[in-house]
Image (cartoon, helix red, strand yellow):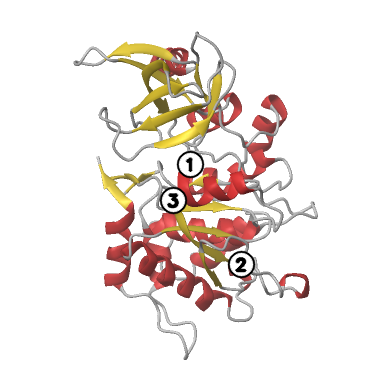
Protein backbone atom coordinates (compact mmCIF):
# COMPACT_ATOMS: atom_id res chain seq x y z
CA UNK A 1 0.00 0.00 0.00
CA UNK A 2 2.82 2.39 0.91
CA UNK A 3 4.50 1.61 -2.41
CA UNK A 4 1.30 2.46 -4.30
CA UNK A 5 0.93 5.74 -2.40
CA UNK A 6 4.56 6.59 -3.14
CA UNK A 7 4.08 5.92 -6.87
CA UNK A 8 0.91 8.02 -6.93
CA UNK A 9 2.79 10.83 -5.22
CA UNK A 10 5.55 10.65 -7.81
CA UNK A 11 3.05 10.67 -10.68
CA UNK A 12 1.15 13.59 -9.15
CA UNK A 13 4.35 15.55 -8.74
CA UNK A 14 5.30 14.89 -12.36
CA UNK A 15 1.89 15.97 -13.64
CA UNK A 16 2.08 19.11 -11.54
CA UNK A 17 5.33 20.03 -13.27
CA UNK A 18 4.17 19.44 -16.84
CA UNK A 19 0.51 20.43 -16.57
CA UNK A 20 1.50 23.80 -18.04
CA UNK A 21 4.56 25.37 -19.61
CA UNK A 22 7.41 25.65 -17.14
CA UNK A 23 10.72 27.36 -17.83
CA UNK A 24 13.95 25.47 -17.32
CA UNK A 25 17.47 26.34 -18.42
CA UNK A 26 19.86 24.38 -20.58
CA UNK A 27 23.65 24.51 -20.37
CA UNK A 28 23.74 27.22 -23.04
CA UNK A 29 21.53 29.51 -20.91
CA UNK A 30 18.59 29.36 -23.34
CA UNK A 31 15.30 29.23 -21.41
CA UNK A 32 13.27 26.20 -22.45
CA UNK A 33 9.55 26.16 -21.83
CA UNK A 34 8.49 22.57 -21.14
CA UNK A 35 4.83 22.26 -22.16
CA UNK A 36 2.38 19.43 -21.63
CA UNK A 37 0.38 18.70 -24.81
CA UNK A 38 -1.93 15.96 -23.49
CA UNK A 39 -5.39 16.99 -22.39
CA UNK A 40 -6.28 16.04 -18.83
CA UNK A 41 -8.55 13.08 -19.50
CA UNK A 42 -6.21 11.44 -22.00
CA UNK A 43 -3.19 11.99 -19.79
CA UNK A 44 -4.87 10.42 -16.78
CA UNK A 45 -6.17 7.50 -18.83
CA UNK A 46 -2.71 6.69 -20.13
CA UNK A 47 -1.03 7.14 -16.74
CA UNK A 48 -3.52 5.47 -14.44
CA UNK A 49 -4.90 2.53 -16.46
CA UNK A 50 -3.15 -0.84 -16.63
CA UNK A 51 -4.86 -3.79 -18.30
CA UNK A 52 -1.99 -6.24 -17.81
CA UNK A 53 -3.92 -8.51 -15.47
CA UNK A 54 -7.09 -8.61 -17.56
CA UNK A 55 -6.26 -11.04 -20.34
CA UNK A 56 -9.93 -12.09 -20.48
CA UNK A 57 -10.94 -8.61 -21.72
CA UNK A 58 -13.61 -8.15 -19.05
CA UNK A 59 -12.74 -4.62 -17.98
CA UNK A 60 -12.65 -1.27 -19.74
CA UNK A 61 -12.09 2.19 -18.27
CA UNK A 62 -12.10 4.40 -21.36
CA UNK A 63 -15.79 5.28 -21.10
CA UNK A 64 -15.36 6.28 -17.46
CA UNK A 65 -12.62 8.74 -18.37
CA UNK A 66 -14.68 10.07 -21.24
CA UNK A 67 -17.64 10.68 -18.92
CA UNK A 68 -15.50 12.30 -16.22
CA UNK A 69 -13.36 14.49 -18.47
CA UNK A 70 -15.38 14.80 -21.66
CA UNK A 71 -14.92 13.31 -25.11
CA UNK A 72 -11.73 14.96 -26.31
CA UNK A 73 -9.18 13.68 -28.78
CA UNK A 74 -7.63 17.14 -29.14
CA UNK A 75 -4.15 17.88 -27.83
CA UNK A 76 -3.28 20.91 -25.75
CA UNK A 77 -1.43 23.61 -27.68
CA UNK A 78 2.02 24.95 -27.00
CA UNK A 79 1.38 28.61 -26.22
CA UNK A 80 3.85 31.37 -27.11
CA UNK A 81 3.36 34.85 -25.64
CA UNK A 82 5.07 38.12 -26.52
CA UNK A 83 4.78 41.89 -26.23
CA UNK A 84 5.34 44.68 -28.72
CA UNK A 85 2.26 44.44 -30.89
CA UNK A 86 0.65 41.98 -33.29
CA UNK A 87 2.70 39.34 -35.05
CA UNK A 88 2.60 37.94 -38.55
CA UNK A 89 4.19 34.52 -38.07
CA UNK A 90 6.28 32.34 -35.80
CA UNK A 91 9.34 30.71 -37.35
CA UNK A 92 10.37 27.42 -35.71
CA UNK A 93 13.34 25.12 -36.07
CA UNK A 94 14.84 22.19 -34.22
CA UNK A 95 18.30 23.82 -34.52
CA UNK A 96 19.46 26.99 -32.82
CA UNK A 97 20.84 28.36 -36.10
CA UNK A 98 17.40 27.91 -37.72
CA UNK A 99 18.16 25.33 -40.35
CA UNK A 100 15.10 23.59 -41.84
CA UNK A 101 12.55 26.06 -40.53
CA UNK A 102 8.78 26.04 -40.76
CA UNK A 103 6.23 28.74 -39.98
CA UNK A 104 2.85 29.04 -38.30
CA UNK A 105 0.59 32.03 -38.67
CA UNK A 106 0.16 34.22 -35.61
CA UNK A 107 -1.49 37.54 -34.78
CA UNK A 108 -2.39 38.31 -31.19
CA UNK A 109 -0.50 37.02 -28.16
CA UNK A 110 -0.58 34.25 -27.05
CA UNK A 111 -0.41 32.06 -30.17
CA UNK A 112 -1.32 28.38 -30.07
CA UNK A 113 0.95 25.89 -31.83
CA UNK A 114 -0.11 22.29 -32.43
CA UNK A 115 1.44 19.08 -33.73
CA UNK A 116 4.95 19.52 -32.36
CA UNK A 117 6.86 16.32 -31.55
CA UNK A 118 7.12 15.43 -27.84
CA UNK A 119 10.58 15.63 -26.32
CA UNK A 120 11.99 17.82 -29.12
CA UNK A 121 13.29 21.34 -28.49
CA UNK A 122 11.96 23.96 -30.90
CA UNK A 123 13.68 27.34 -31.21
CA UNK A 124 11.32 30.07 -32.35
CA UNK A 125 11.16 33.68 -33.47
CA UNK A 126 7.98 35.72 -33.32
CA UNK A 127 7.98 38.16 -36.25
CA UNK A 128 5.77 41.05 -37.25
CA UNK A 129 4.74 41.89 -40.81
CA UNK A 130 8.01 43.80 -41.38
CA UNK A 131 10.15 40.86 -40.31
CA UNK A 132 11.05 42.46 -36.98
CA UNK A 133 11.67 39.85 -34.29
CA UNK A 134 9.37 40.49 -31.32
CA UNK A 135 10.59 37.54 -29.27
CA UNK A 136 12.92 34.57 -29.41
CA UNK A 137 12.68 31.47 -27.28
CA UNK A 138 12.62 27.69 -27.07
CA UNK A 139 9.79 25.29 -26.27
CA UNK A 140 9.73 21.54 -25.68
CA UNK A 141 6.38 19.70 -25.75
CA UNK A 142 5.87 16.73 -23.44
CA UNK A 143 3.43 13.89 -24.10
CA UNK A 144 4.23 11.26 -24.95
CA UNK A 145 1.01 10.83 -26.97
CA UNK A 146 1.01 13.00 -30.09
CA UNK A 147 -2.57 13.72 -31.06
CA UNK A 148 -2.88 15.67 -34.31
CA UNK A 149 -4.95 18.81 -34.71
CA UNK A 150 -6.31 20.33 -37.90
CA UNK A 151 -6.37 17.42 -40.40
CA UNK A 152 -9.33 15.14 -39.66
CA UNK A 153 -11.08 13.47 -36.73
CA UNK A 154 -9.38 10.94 -34.47
CA UNK A 155 -5.86 11.45 -35.86
CA UNK A 156 -2.74 10.57 -33.91
CA UNK A 157 0.88 9.68 -34.43
CA UNK A 158 1.75 6.07 -33.58
CA UNK A 159 4.98 7.35 -32.08
CA UNK A 160 5.72 7.28 -28.38
CA UNK A 161 4.43 3.85 -27.38
CA UNK A 162 7.00 1.73 -25.56
CA UNK A 163 8.21 -0.97 -27.94
CA UNK A 164 10.88 -3.66 -28.04
CA UNK A 165 13.91 -2.05 -26.39
CA UNK A 166 12.71 1.50 -26.99
CA UNK A 167 9.71 3.36 -28.32
CA UNK A 168 7.94 3.82 -31.65
CA UNK A 169 9.42 6.70 -33.64
CA UNK A 170 7.38 9.84 -34.15
CA UNK A 171 6.55 11.14 -37.59
CA UNK A 172 6.60 7.80 -39.42
CA UNK A 173 3.09 6.36 -39.10
CA UNK A 174 -0.17 8.18 -38.50
CA UNK A 175 -3.64 6.72 -37.98
CA UNK A 176 -7.00 8.40 -38.31
CA UNK A 177 -10.34 8.90 -40.04
CA UNK A 178 -11.12 9.60 -43.68
CA UNK A 179 -9.85 12.77 -45.30
CA UNK A 180 -12.59 15.13 -46.41
CA UNK A 181 -12.86 16.11 -50.06
CA UNK A 182 -13.51 19.61 -48.70
CA UNK A 183 -10.22 19.81 -46.79
CA UNK A 184 -8.94 23.34 -46.44
CA UNK A 185 -5.61 24.39 -47.89
CA UNK A 186 -4.35 24.81 -44.32
CA UNK A 187 -5.30 21.20 -43.47
CA UNK A 188 -3.50 19.97 -46.58
CA UNK A 189 -0.45 22.03 -45.63
CA UNK A 190 -0.42 20.46 -42.16
CA UNK A 191 -0.71 17.00 -43.71
CA UNK A 192 2.01 17.42 -46.33
CA UNK A 193 4.43 19.89 -44.80
CA UNK A 194 4.07 20.04 -41.01
CA UNK A 195 3.56 16.29 -40.62
CA UNK A 196 5.57 15.34 -43.70
CA UNK A 197 3.10 12.65 -44.83
CA UNK A 198 3.54 11.50 -48.41
CA UNK A 199 1.35 8.35 -48.52
CA UNK A 200 -2.42 8.07 -48.00
CA UNK A 201 -3.21 4.39 -47.32
CA UNK A 202 -6.97 3.87 -47.45
CA UNK A 203 -8.60 0.80 -45.88
CA UNK A 204 -12.08 1.62 -47.21
CA UNK A 205 -13.82 0.19 -50.23
CA UNK A 206 -15.57 -3.01 -49.21
CA UNK A 207 -18.94 -1.23 -48.94
CA UNK A 208 -20.84 0.12 -51.92
CA UNK A 209 -20.86 3.55 -50.28
CA UNK A 210 -17.04 3.49 -50.17
CA UNK A 211 -16.31 1.97 -53.57
CA UNK A 212 -15.70 5.37 -55.15
CA UNK A 213 -13.47 6.64 -52.36
CA UNK A 214 -10.22 7.94 -53.76
CA UNK A 215 -7.42 10.48 -53.61
CA UNK A 216 -8.07 13.69 -51.70
CA UNK A 217 -4.61 15.29 -51.52
CA UNK A 218 -2.81 15.59 -54.85
CA UNK A 219 0.59 15.84 -53.23
CA UNK A 220 0.32 12.44 -51.54
CA UNK A 221 0.58 9.00 -53.10
CA UNK A 222 -2.70 7.09 -52.77
CA UNK A 223 -3.12 3.34 -52.26
CA UNK A 224 -6.16 1.32 -51.23
CA UNK A 225 -6.59 -1.99 -49.39
CA UNK A 226 -10.37 -2.51 -49.02
CA UNK A 227 -10.51 -4.70 -45.90
CA UNK A 228 -13.50 -5.69 -43.84
CA UNK A 229 -13.54 -4.18 -40.39
CA UNK A 230 -13.24 -7.40 -38.46
CA UNK A 231 -10.13 -9.53 -38.84
CA UNK A 232 -11.51 -12.00 -36.30
CA UNK A 233 -14.33 -13.20 -38.52
CA UNK A 234 -11.87 -14.00 -41.28
CA UNK A 235 -14.32 -13.38 -44.10
CA UNK A 236 -13.29 -12.65 -47.66
CA UNK A 237 -9.67 -11.75 -48.23
CA UNK A 238 -9.42 -9.60 -45.11
CA UNK A 239 -6.44 -11.38 -43.57
CA UNK A 240 -4.16 -11.26 -46.58
CA UNK A 241 -5.14 -7.64 -47.27
CA UNK A 242 -3.93 -6.70 -43.78
CA UNK A 243 -0.70 -8.55 -44.54
CA UNK A 244 -0.37 -6.65 -47.82
CA UNK A 245 -1.05 -3.33 -46.07
CA UNK A 246 1.73 -4.02 -43.57
CA UNK A 247 4.07 -5.04 -46.41
CA UNK A 248 3.27 -1.82 -48.26
CA UNK A 249 3.97 0.24 -45.14
CA UNK A 250 7.34 -1.47 -44.72
CA UNK A 251 8.17 -0.60 -48.32
CA UNK A 252 7.20 3.05 -47.94
CA UNK A 253 9.13 3.38 -44.67
CA UNK A 254 12.15 1.94 -46.45
CA UNK A 255 11.84 4.76 -48.99
CA UNK A 256 11.77 7.31 -46.18
CA UNK A 257 8.07 8.09 -46.65
CA UNK A 258 5.67 8.77 -43.78
CA UNK A 259 2.30 6.99 -44.07
CA UNK A 260 -1.21 7.97 -42.99
CA UNK A 261 -3.53 4.95 -42.80
CA UNK A 262 -7.23 5.27 -42.20
CA UNK A 263 -10.70 3.89 -42.82
CA UNK A 264 -13.90 5.90 -42.35
CA UNK A 265 -13.89 6.77 -38.65
CA UNK A 266 -10.43 5.52 -37.73
CA UNK A 267 -11.90 2.96 -35.35
CA UNK A 268 -12.33 -0.63 -36.57
CA UNK A 269 -10.20 -1.23 -39.65
CA UNK A 270 -7.67 1.39 -38.63
CA UNK A 271 -7.63 0.12 -35.06
CA UNK A 272 -7.05 -3.45 -36.22
CA UNK A 273 -4.12 -2.50 -38.46
CA UNK A 274 -2.60 -0.38 -35.70
CA UNK A 275 -2.96 -3.30 -33.26
CA UNK A 276 -1.16 -5.68 -35.63
CA UNK A 277 1.69 -3.27 -36.38
CA UNK A 278 2.19 -2.28 -32.75
CA UNK A 279 2.13 -5.91 -31.63
CA UNK A 280 4.85 -6.73 -34.16
CA UNK A 281 6.88 -3.89 -32.66
CA UNK A 282 6.65 -5.31 -29.15
CA UNK A 283 4.06 -2.95 -27.65
CA UNK A 284 2.53 -4.50 -24.52
CA UNK A 285 -0.95 -6.01 -24.61
CA UNK A 286 -2.15 -3.42 -22.10
CA UNK A 287 -0.94 -0.54 -24.28
CA UNK A 288 -2.42 -2.17 -27.39
CA UNK A 289 -5.80 -1.98 -25.67
CA UNK A 290 -5.29 1.63 -24.63
CA UNK A 291 -4.36 2.76 -28.13
CA UNK A 292 -7.44 0.99 -29.48
CA UNK A 293 -9.67 2.62 -26.86
CA UNK A 294 -8.31 6.14 -27.40
CA UNK A 295 -10.67 6.34 -30.38
CA UNK A 296 -13.46 6.62 -27.80
CA UNK A 297 -12.10 10.04 -26.83
CA UNK A 298 -13.04 11.36 -30.28
CA UNK A 299 -16.66 11.14 -29.13
CA UNK A 300 -18.17 9.73 -32.32
CA UNK A 301 -16.85 6.17 -32.06
CA UNK A 302 -17.12 4.31 -28.76
CA UNK A 303 -14.62 1.46 -29.02
CA UNK A 304 -14.10 -0.50 -25.81
CA UNK A 305 -11.97 -3.56 -25.16
CA UNK A 306 -14.39 -5.49 -22.95
CA UNK A 307 -16.85 -8.01 -24.31
CA UNK A 308 -20.42 -6.99 -23.49
CA UNK A 309 -22.62 -9.96 -24.37
CA UNK A 310 -25.92 -8.23 -23.69
CA UNK A 311 -25.20 -5.08 -25.67
CA UNK A 312 -25.59 -4.49 -29.38
CA UNK A 313 -22.15 -3.03 -29.87
CA UNK A 314 -19.06 -3.85 -31.85
CA UNK A 315 -16.55 -6.15 -30.21
CA UNK A 316 -13.78 -5.77 -32.74
CA UNK A 317 -10.85 -5.94 -30.35
CA UNK A 318 -12.25 -8.92 -28.45
CA UNK A 319 -12.85 -10.83 -31.66
CA UNK A 320 -9.45 -9.83 -33.02
CA UNK A 321 -7.58 -11.09 -29.96
CA UNK A 322 -9.67 -14.28 -29.94
CA UNK A 323 -8.69 -14.90 -33.55
CA UNK A 324 -5.01 -14.12 -33.01
CA UNK A 325 -4.88 -16.61 -30.15
CA UNK A 326 -5.52 -19.39 -32.63
CA UNK A 327 -2.01 -18.91 -34.04
CA UNK A 328 -0.05 -20.49 -31.23
CA UNK A 329 -0.37 -21.16 -27.53
CA UNK A 330 -1.71 -18.09 -25.68
CA UNK A 331 -0.73 -19.65 -22.35
CA UNK A 332 2.96 -19.66 -23.21
CA UNK A 333 3.29 -17.13 -26.04
CA UNK A 334 2.80 -13.37 -25.77
CA UNK A 335 0.33 -11.54 -27.95
CA UNK A 336 3.36 -10.16 -29.80
CA UNK A 337 4.51 -13.65 -30.73
CA UNK A 338 0.98 -14.71 -31.66
CA UNK A 339 0.65 -11.75 -34.05
CA UNK A 340 4.02 -12.63 -35.57
CA UNK A 341 2.74 -16.19 -36.04
CA UNK A 342 -0.35 -14.79 -37.77
CA UNK A 343 1.72 -12.47 -39.95
CA UNK A 344 4.00 -15.28 -41.14
CA UNK A 345 1.11 -17.67 -41.87
CA UNK A 346 -0.18 -18.09 -45.43
CA UNK A 347 -3.88 -17.21 -45.56
CA UNK A 348 -4.25 -17.34 -49.34
CA UNK A 349 -2.58 -19.22 -52.19
CA UNK A 350 -2.20 -15.89 -54.00
CA UNK A 351 -0.57 -13.78 -51.27
CA UNK A 352 2.74 -14.58 -49.66
CA UNK A 353 2.84 -14.15 -45.88
CA UNK A 354 5.16 -11.66 -44.27
CA UNK A 355 8.66 -12.95 -43.70
CA UNK A 356 10.69 -12.63 -40.52
CA UNK A 357 13.10 -10.40 -42.43
CA UNK A 358 10.26 -8.04 -43.35
CA UNK A 359 9.20 -7.90 -39.71
CA UNK A 360 12.80 -7.11 -38.73
CA UNK A 361 12.75 -4.24 -41.22
CA UNK A 362 9.50 -2.93 -39.72
CA UNK A 363 11.18 -2.88 -36.32
CA UNK A 364 14.31 -1.29 -37.74
CA UNK A 365 12.36 1.53 -39.34
CA UNK A 366 10.01 2.24 -36.44
CA UNK A 367 11.74 1.49 -33.14
CA UNK A 368 13.98 4.08 -31.54
CA UNK A 369 16.23 2.46 -28.95
CA UNK A 370 16.13 4.04 -25.48
Classify mark 2: residues with Cα within 10 Å, few (<14), some (14-19) or many (20+): some
Could you tell me if residue 305 is visible in this image? no
Q: Is residue 346 left or right of residue 261?
A: left
Cα gap from disc 3 to disc 1, whole angstroms: 38 Å
* Residue 357 locus on image (x, y percent): 26, 71
Q: Which of pointers 2 and 1 lies earlier in the amino acid sequence?
A: 1
Please tell me which residue is depicted at 57% across the width and 56% down the height of the picture. 271
For mark 2, what is the residue? 215
Quarter of the figure with residue 133: top left
Question: Mark 1 falls on what kind of element?
Answer: loop
Quadrant showing the C terminus: top left
Above or below: residue 60 compared with residue 128: below
Badge 3 is on which residue? 196
The residue identified by callout 1 is 53
Look at the numbered discs 2 and 1 and tell me whether their residues touch, using CB distance below 8 Å: no
Q: Nearer the viewer, residue 183 or 322?
A: 183
The Cα atoms of the two marked residues, 3 and 2, are separated by 17 Å
Q: Are marks 3 and 1 in contact (CB under 8 Å)?
A: no
Estimate the x, y position of residue 247 in percent, counting from the top left.
41, 71
In space, the residues marked 2 and 1 are separated at their CA atoms by 43 Å
Measured from the top left, where is residue 98 in percent x and y?
30, 32
Amino acid sequence: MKRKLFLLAVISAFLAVVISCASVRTNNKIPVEVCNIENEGTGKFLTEVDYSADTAYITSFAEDYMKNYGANDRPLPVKVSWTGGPASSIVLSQSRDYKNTFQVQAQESPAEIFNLVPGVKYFYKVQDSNGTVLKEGCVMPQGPLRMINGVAENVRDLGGWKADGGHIAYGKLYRGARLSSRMSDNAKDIFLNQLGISVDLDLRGIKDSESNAGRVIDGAEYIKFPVEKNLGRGTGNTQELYQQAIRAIIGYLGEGKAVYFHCAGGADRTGSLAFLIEALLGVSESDLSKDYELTTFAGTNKRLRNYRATEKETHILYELITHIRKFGNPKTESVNQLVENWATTRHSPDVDPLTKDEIKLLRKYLIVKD
